[in-house]
Image: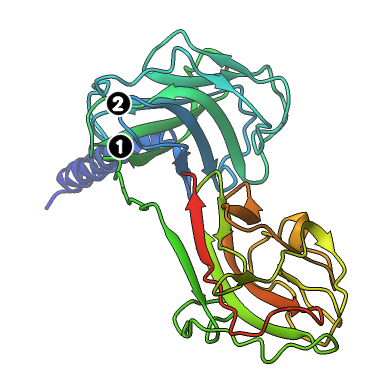
Amino acid sequence: MSKQNLLKRIAVRSRIVIAAVFTISTVIMPFALSSTAQAAQITSRKVTLGSSTPSAATSYTLSTAALPTATAVQSLELVACTTASGACTLPSGFTSVGSATTGTTTGLGTNSGWTNNTATAGKLRITNTNAVAPSGVVSVPWTAVTNPSATNTTYYLRMNTYSDVAWSTLIDSGVIAVSTSTAIVVTASVDESLTFCTGTSGITSTSCSGATGSSVALGTLTPSTSGTGTSQVGVTTNASSGYVITYNGVLPTSGANTIASIGAGATSPAQGTSQFGMNLVANTVPTTFGATVAGAGSAVPVAAVNTTNQYSYTAGAATNVVSQGTADGFRFFTVSYLANVSGTQAPGTYTTTLTYVCTATF
C-alpha cells in the first residue's frame, strides 16, 4: 500500500472517530440540561382538614418537612385538582375565594409578612417579598376553605414553591391526596327515669335493689320511755326540674284515741307529753338512731325534718320531706320516727300508715 493511500485511510478513520464523539455528545447534552430543570420533591407533606364534610367551609393546614432547596421562597400555592398529575380539573364545589391565613406561617424563611391571595378559586396561594432561605418544618394554616361538594371523593392538592411573587419560577413541588367523607350521625335516646323505693331495710347509698319491709315497731311507750324506729327511702331521677318527696298519714290511732302531732315545724321532744314526729337525720335524743343522708346525689331534707334531735309531723295532708330542683344522683334517706306519751294517754295499740310519694318534673 502506498504511503498516500495509508494516510487517506488514517484520515478517514480519524474523521469517523471524531464524528462519533460529536454524535454521542449531542445525545448526552439534552439529558444533562433537562435534569437541571426538574423541581425537587417535597417530603412528609400533608394537609389536615378541619372537616371532611362535603361543601363545608373549614380549615386547611399544610405541613411538610423542611424544603429540599435552599432558595428563598416568595410564593407558594396548593392547586386543587381531580387528579394527581396531568391536566388539572377543579373539583366541583371547591373554592378558596373566602379563605384566609391565620396563625403563624413557618418554614418558608420568614414567619411574617405573608399575604393570602384569593383571586383564583381553585388555588390556595400566599406571597411574600422574602429573601431568607427556608429552614425547618413548613406549616401554613388557612381557614374558610370550601370543600368539594361530592362525598367520599378523593382530590389532590398540588403544592409548588416559587422564587418570585408571581408563582412562575418553580423551586420545589409535591402532591397531597385528601378526601371528603360522609358524616356519620350516631343517635341514642335516653328515656325519662325515676327510681324510688321505700322499706325498712336493704336500701343502700347506691341502690334500691334490696329494699324490703313495711312495718316499724316503736315498742311500748310510757311517760318516761320514748319509742323510736326507722324506715328507708331511696331515689334518683334524670328529671331536669328534679323531684319532691311527700308523706301523707293520719295521727297514730287506737280506736277513738290518737297521739298528737309534735308540730309542723322542727320541735324538740319532751317525755311525758303525747307527741308523734319524724325527721330524716341522725339523732342522739332520746337515743342514738337514724342516719345522715348518703349517696352520690345532692338532695337534702326540707328544714322541718333536717335538724338533729328535732322532729315534726303534719297529719292528714301531703307534706314535703325532700325537695330537689334538678336531676340528681342516688340519695339514701333514713326516716326516724319518735313517739312520747303522757301519763293519761289511753292504752291501746296505736297505728298510722304513711304513704310516701315521689313526684318528678321532667
> Counting other residues with Cα less than 10 Å from the Cα at mark 1, is it few (<14), some (14-19), or many (20 or more)?
many
Q: What secondary structure is found at the residue carrying circle 2? A: loop
Q: Residue at x 67, y 30 (%)?
A: 103
Q: Residue at x 50, y 20 (%)?
A: 125
**Whether label 1 touches label 2, CB < 8 Å:** yes
> Counting other residues with Cα less than 10 Å from the Cα at mark 2, is it few (<14), some (14-19), or many (20 or more)?
many
On screen, residue 238 versus residue 283, left or right, reads left
On screen, residue 80 versus residue 62, left or right, reads left
* Residue 109 seen from this side: yes
Report how far apart the C-alphas of labels 1 and 2 lie in the structure.
7 Å
Q: Residue at x 49, y 45 (%)?
A: 361
Q: Which mark is residue 180?
A: 1
- Give the amino acid type for the residue marked by disc 2 in the picture: Pro
Frontmost residue, 213 versus 6: 213
Frontmost residue, 31 versus 312: 312
* Percent of width and height locating residue 115: 62, 16
Q: What residue is pinned by disc 2?
A: 148
Q: Compared to 206, does 240 lie above or below?
A: above
* Residue 205 seen from this side: no
- Give the amino acid type for the residue marked by disc 1 in the picture: Thr
Q: What secondary structure is found at the residue carrying circle 1? A: loop
Q: Compared to 145, does 195 lie above or below?
A: below
Frontmost residue, 203 versus 177: 203
Quadrant housing residue 259: bottom right
Q: Which residue, as the protein is rendered here, is positioned at the far left?
A: 1
User: Which is nearer the N-term, disc 1 or disc 2?
Assistant: 2
Q: Which residue, as the protein is rendered here, is positioned at the far top?
A: 119
* Percent of width and height locating residue 33: 39, 33
